[in-house]
Amino acid sequence: MQVLVRDNNIDQALKALKKKLQREGIFREMKIRRHYEKPSERRAREAAEAIRRARKLERKRLEREGF
């Protein structure tokens, strides 16, 4: 991953880097990998995340349609 530093403005470059890392999900993955996660716990977490995403999409769809 690469971020350009313009006019020696490191603060702006760091902000851009953090935004890119956030979008890629690096911070979330680092948090998950801090401790060992059993395969059964991983499947349960991923299933819960999928349910959460589906509900969020459904909420947004209903909100867009005006219900």
Image (tube, grey):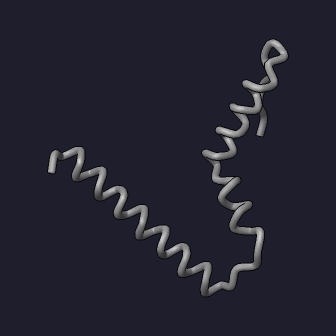
Q: Nearer the viewer, residue 31 or 23?
A: 31
Query: Which corner quadrant of the image does residue 33 belong to?
Result: bottom right
Q: Residue at x 41, y 70 (%)?
A: 51
Figure disc tally: 0
Q: Is residue 1 left or right of residue 43?
A: right
Q: Residue at x 65, y 84 (%)?
A: 39
Q: Residue at x 70, y 39 (%)?
A: 18
Q: Is residue 23 above or below residue 38?
A: above
Which residue reaches farthest left? Answer: 67
Q: Position of residue 40 (x, y in %)?
A: 61, 87
Q: Is residue 39 above or below residue 48?
A: below
Q: Position of residue 22 (x, y in %)?
A: 64, 46
Query: Which corner quadrant of the image does residue 57 belong to?
Result: bottom left
Which residue reaches farthest front? Answer: 11
- The quadrant of the picture occupied by the N terminus is top right
Q: Residue at x 53, y 81 (%)?
A: 44
Q: Position of residue 8 (x, y in %)?
A: 84, 16
Q: Position of residue 41 (x, y in %)?
A: 61, 83
Query: Which corner quadrant of the image does residue 21 belong to?
Result: top right
Which residue reaches farthest right? Answer: 8
Q: Is residue 29 above or below residue 38?
A: above
Q: Is residue 6 above or below residue 36?
A: above
